[in-house]
Image (cartoon, rainbow, N blue to C red):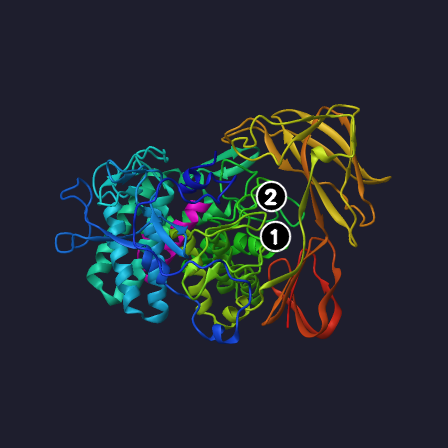
Amino acid sequence: MYTHTRRGARLVALTTALTLSVGTAIAMPLAASAAPPATHASSAADLAAPLTNLSHLDFLLDEATPPADVEGHTTYRLAEEPTLVLPWTYADARDGGTFERVGGGPFVPETGYWVQGAYNADDVARAAVVYLRHWRLTGSESSRTSAYELLRSLTYLQTAEGPNAGNVVLWMQPDGTLNPSPEIVELPDPSDSGPSYWLARTIWALGEGYAAFQEDDPYFAGFLEERLALSVDALNRQVLVKYGQWAESDGKKVPTWLIVNGADASAEAVLGLAARVKAQPADTTAATALRQLAEGIAAMSDGNARQWPYGAILPWAESRSIWHAWGSQMPAALAEASMALADPSLAAAAVKDSAVFTPTLLTAGGPDNGWNPTPTDQVQIAYGVDSRVQSLLSVADATGSRGFADLAAMQAAWFFGANRADVQMYDPATGVGYDGLEPNGNVNRNSGAESTIHALLTMIALDARPELAARAASVTSVDEIAGLRSVQAESAVATDGTIFTPEESWTGESSWAGDALTLGRGQSATFDIGTDDIRRWVEPVVWSEEGEVGVSTWRAGRLPTGVLVDRGPAQGISPTPGVLLPRSLQLPVLGDRSRLTVDVLRGELTLDALLVRPVLSRLELSGDGGVSHLVHSIAKVPQPAIVGASGVATTAYVYDSTGALVHEQGGTGEYSVTLPPSGFVIVLG
């Protein structure tokens, strides 16, 4: 499994993310209310109040007093202030509309410990960011205090001396005892023995913490500066020592100097480094680390509007075949780095991700936990939604493009009901952010630290932008969605090939969408892809073995759609021989053609699925705040599109494939606009 994050132990990353409560609950005070998710209505009066409500996150906070004289672990004023403040990892919904705070793994009554622990560094760091940003936005003294306490706790978890100095212990038990090697194994093990997601998130919090306290409390800021330098030293000796070295992963050239080979992990470190460099430009060590990590993240950009992964920045250097919404702050990181270093070129990959991939994602149903490469894990969680919102807003700041901010509002509307379940996933009255939305529309009503944190990070960002907040909270119905979808290979309406079931869905670097179909030379298969009122691009998702060559022809009826010459690339550093990838054909399928046929001319074709994408994809939202529509083109030439809504006065803002405004056009009812190649239009009214 792809489990080099805590999400692997709890959610089994890229396969499921909805069973967020593990083990037996320990008795704890209960939150005041955990009412069922509300329907999507929001009143005008509600919109006048701030969306950010810290009550539930406050409820998750608890105190722990660690044992005295733990080697390598201390923090600011520990002798004077021996008690630490940390958030419980999970909060499980209980009868009567309440929550119970829960640790990670089963609870062991004999010891009073959890198999993993009660608190973890990931959530301590990110909770600190919440309170820091809220304090800086509102001046709240209570948020300042919580930020101070959480940063003290985080730096206690950081190993301050010895060979692992700068690294971070992930888990702590309720009494303050560290648990560096939990039974549910995390990598690295012990958790402070190498680079990790929690090291990256520690750098994030320390960088933003220094910037916030720099003038408010210079002594504490100086302490944070020292601890940030300690973690950057660890980053340099363990990760960035490989800067400039490249590897190959299933034929793609990839950087070797990303934290745990992850652009996702590295992005969260970059957020902290960028905050530090903005606050202290003279810190050349931080600036160098910032630039080097940013260059590595940018190198993970791939594809275009018609080719996987559609301009996205891939999260993991060991796989060309997965993208996940959780932790997908790579565009935000590049945008923030570009502003901190005054280098617009660093934002180029972020712009491509935001202008080309994000409209593809939104019109396909939103921020799924895993396109691997088909949308096999369609669970959606606050971490994924917030990651996309933060990225769009940062790219908007870096480029000045209103289009990215408007896309962010459409994505943020997920929290208020613009989702497949038509329910609120965040409640401004309680500060509860629910733990997940299943593909069938069921809501996981638990509300742990991660979901709460990332819901609040979006709310803070919206509160800083009242116009976007009002729109996001009031366009809460999904009226139409039409974009990328998949057709399973085993659903062929006619074939002389062989259908087989993979032994495991997870390949080590991707996931099979279901059963697969193998065709040998001279064999064929026909699929029903349905009809549409517009042309469609079809991408076969093919398993390729290293060094093997296969040739197949594709046609819709008698009209050719392309020749697929499939050459299996060299494995390189990827975990598994062979690769599962969407392959591009040369021509689209006309809208009135429902049957697609493949004939194998040479070698063998192993087919997992077909990705079917309309040349124009759509997402239409409406509510008390009017309408917000998105139309995205993947055509190679300018494409006319009908936009607007019956009886409604709207304005269409047309953007090119870089998010630059091409023109705007108003109208009442439906009217035609022309989209540039790979461009998009946002219609507001």
Q: Is residue 204 visible?
A: no
Q: Can residue 279 be seen in this view?
A: yes
- Kindly report the secondary structure that dominates the magenta region of the rendered protein: helix
44 sits to left or right of 73: right
Residue 266 covered by magenta stretch: yes
Q: Mark 2 points at which residue?
A: 375
Marks 1 and 2, how far apart in space?
Answer: 10 Å
Secondary element at image label 2:
loop
Could you tell me the amino acid type at mark 2? Pro
Find residue 282 and report its image quarter.
Answer: bottom left
Q: Please state the total of marks drawn on the protein image.
A: 2
Tell me the residue at 52%/39% (across/down): 15
Residue most extreme to the front: 96
Residue placed most toward the observer, 64 or 650: 64
Find residue 401 and report its image quarter.
Answer: bottom right
Question: Residue 403 location, x and y as percent?
Answer: 58, 65
Residue segment shown in magenta = 264-284
Could you tell me the amino acid type at mark 1? Gly
Above or below residue 396? Residue 230 is above
Mark 1 is surrounded, within 10 Å at the Cα level, by few (under 14), some (14 to 19) or many (20 or more) other residues, namely: many
Q: Do the residues labelled 1 and 2 touch (CB within 8 Å)?
A: yes
Question: Residue 347 location, x and y as percent?
Answer: 50, 56
Q: Earlier in the sequence, mark 1 or mark 2?
A: 1
Q: Name the residue under label 1.
A: 365
Mark 2 is surrounded, within 10 Å at the Cα level, by few (under 14), some (14 to 19) or many (20 or more) other residues, namely: many
Question: Residue 536 location, x and y as percent?
Answer: 75, 48
Secondary element at image label 1:
loop
Residue 353 covered by magenta stretch: no
Tell me the residue at 83%/49% (across/down): 592
Considering the image in quadrants, where does the C terminus appear? bottom right
Above or below residue 175? Residue 511 is above
Res. 522 mark:
none
